[in-house]
Image (cartoon, rainbow, N blue to C red):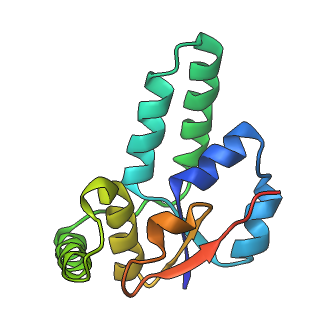
């Protein structure tokens, strides 16, 4: 068991909306992983920051985050992704504008991890996903 932490949680930690202790209350002693999708989303945010101070702060946060174990996306992840997208389409659920979330969910399902997120709506309807929601104060 363990947790795959959604990008929004790391953004909230970087911005001070969540403390690392808040995240630890959910994860306890379980292993915590990040996805390359999260790395991509955070890198995009850092590179697009117009303020040099914010850019530097985001790059430093990304550097610290990359010390955590990063899950790989492989052929099994791809098969799970394709299956999830097909299941969601069959259920009449939107998946096209949620590609990043589906990759994160696919990795979590592949490795039997729980996704920790503050964006319940992004994940709640994904079949077979274990989900834990952080409600910000």
Depth order, front residue of 135/72: 135
Q: Is residue 24 left or right of residue 48?
A: right
Q: What percent of the width, then of the height, locates residue 56?
A: 60, 21
Quarter occupied by the C terminus: bottom right
Q: What percent of the width, then of the height, locates residue 71?
A: 39, 64
Q: Quadrant of residue 40?
A: top left
Q: What percent of the width, then of the height, locates residue 42?
A: 48, 39
Report how many numbered discs are placed on residues in the image.
0
Residue at the location (34% across, 80% down)? 110
Depth order, front residue of 10/86: 86
Residue at the location (43% across, 82% down)? 129
Q: Is residue 78 left or right of residue 116?
A: left
Residue furthest front as drawn: 92
Residue at the location (61% across, 76% down)? 132
Q: Quadrant of residue 135?
A: bottom right
Q: Quadrant of residue 83?
A: bottom left
Q: What percent of the width, then of the height, locates residue 76?
A: 20, 76
Q: Is residue 62 above or below residue 32?
A: above
Quarter occupied by the N terminus: bottom right
Q: Is residue 108 left or right of residue 83?
A: right
Residue at the location (20% across, 75% down)? 89
């Amino acid at each position: 068991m363990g947790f795959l932490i959604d990008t929004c949680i790391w953004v909230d930690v970087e911005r001070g909306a969540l403390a690392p202790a808040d995240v630890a209350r959910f994860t306890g002693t379980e292993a915590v992983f990040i996805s390359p999708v999260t790395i991509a989303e955070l890198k995009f945010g850092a590179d697009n920051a117009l303020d040099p101070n914010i850019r530097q702060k985001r790059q430093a946060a990304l550097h610290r985050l990359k010390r955590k174990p990063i899950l790989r996306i492989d052929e099994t992840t791809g098969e799970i992704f394709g299956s999830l997208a097909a299941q969601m389409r069959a259920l009449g659920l939107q998946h096209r504008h949620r590609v990043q979330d589906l990759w994160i969910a696919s990795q979590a399902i592949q490795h039997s991890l729980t996704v920790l997120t503050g964006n319940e709506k992004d994940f709640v309807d994904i079949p077979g996903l274990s989900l834990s929601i952080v409600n910000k104060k």
